[in-house]
Each structure stands twice: as C-alpha cells, then as structure tokens.
Amino acid sequence: IYQHAKEDLVAALVNDALSSIQNYFQNLKTNRIHPYQYYQRRAEELSLALKYTDPQQEDYKRFFARKLFLEGRALVNYDTKFYQQGIQKLDSALQIDSTLAYIYSALGIAYNGISKYDLSIAYLKKAASFAPSWMGPLDNLAINYESLDKYDSSIVYFKKALQMDSGD
C-alpha cells in the first residue's frame, strides 16, 4: 500500500508541474507571464517528487531537468538581477535533457532580457528547430531582430508566427 501511495503522490506532483510547463507554451502565445511564485511552487513539487523517485530510473533525470527549468523560469521572472542564476539553471537543465524546446526558448527569452541578442537568437532558432509547429520561438525571434534594427528579418519571423497562429 505504501508503494502505491508513493507512486500516486509522485504522479500528482509531476502532473501539476507538467501542466505548468504546458501553460508556459500557452502563455507565451498570449503574453501572459506567471509570477515567480508560480514557477517556484511547481519546482518545489518536483523536488518532492524526486525524493520519492529512484535516481536510477529514467524518469528521475526527466523530472530533474524539468525542475531546473521551472527554477530557472522562476528566477528569470522574478527580477533582472537574477537572470544569470536563472540562465545557469536553464543551462543545467539542457545538460540533462537537450531535446526540450521550451528550455531553449526560455534561454532565448532570458538572453533577450539582458540584451544578449546573438545568444538569444541562437537559442530561439534551436527551440524552433525542435518544435517547428510552436509559434513562440518565431515571435521572440522577430522581437530580437527588431531590437537589432533588422526589420526585414523581424517581419519575416512575425509573418511566420502569424501564419502559424492563424493556421494558414
């Protein structure tokens, strides 16, 4: 009975965290950004789930990468003075799982926030390559190019994002 209860607890905690990551995708589309506490709370839930997960299981690494992502997003959302710490968490998440488009996207957004546009563009292009049907990286690429006064490139990416958003 203890094992079953433990598995149910882990599943519930992980589901909350995964739904917050899904919300991250949707919120980029609407420009609604959750506050620091939202992402930090989900990261704490994953920390608890990790306590009850065998480190030898493949799930452990996936949960840990997602926890680092949520912690990184929390720091980046909190204040610009925490961007470097947030970027370090996001980089650590990539070291564990380098296939998650939303981590690349979050790094791109973070680097944009500290005006490191070349890094931002590189991460956003990587995010777009991993998730070609997600408009978020394209929209953020357009914003980066606009910040660099590269309006032709900005318009190209805004159009791609709009096409994707409208389904055309």
Image (cartoon, rainbow, N blue to C red):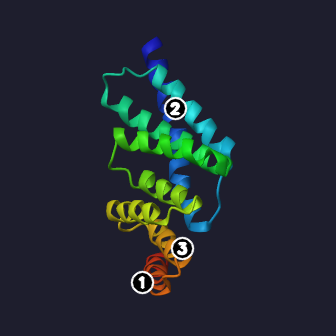
Tell which circle, 1 or 3, labels the residue nearer the N-terminal end: 3
Q: Residues within 10 Å of mark 1 (few under 14, many from 20)?
A: few
Q: Secondary structure at mark 3?
A: helix
Residue 30 at what x, y percent from top left?
61, 67
Seen from the viewer's position, the closer of residues 111 and 32 is: 111
Q: Which residue is mark 1?
A: 168
**Is label 2 or label 1 in front?**
2
Q: Residue at x 37, y 20 (%)?
A: 54
**As drawn, 4 above or below 34:** above
Tell which circle, 2 or 3, labels the residue nearer the N-terminal end: 2
Q: Secondary structure at mark 1?
A: loop
Tell which circle, 2 or 1, labels the residue nearer the N-terminal end: 2
Could you tell me how far apart the alpha carbons at marks 1 and 3 are, in whole angstroms?
Answer: 21 Å
Q: Which residue is mark 3?
A: 143
Seen from the viewer's position, the closer of residues 135 and 154 is: 154
Could you tell me how far apart the alpha carbons at marks 2 and 1 are, in whole angstroms?
Answer: 38 Å
Label 1 near label 2: C-beta < 8 Å? Answer: no
**As drawn, 49 above or below 159:** above
Q: Which residue is mark 2?
A: 46
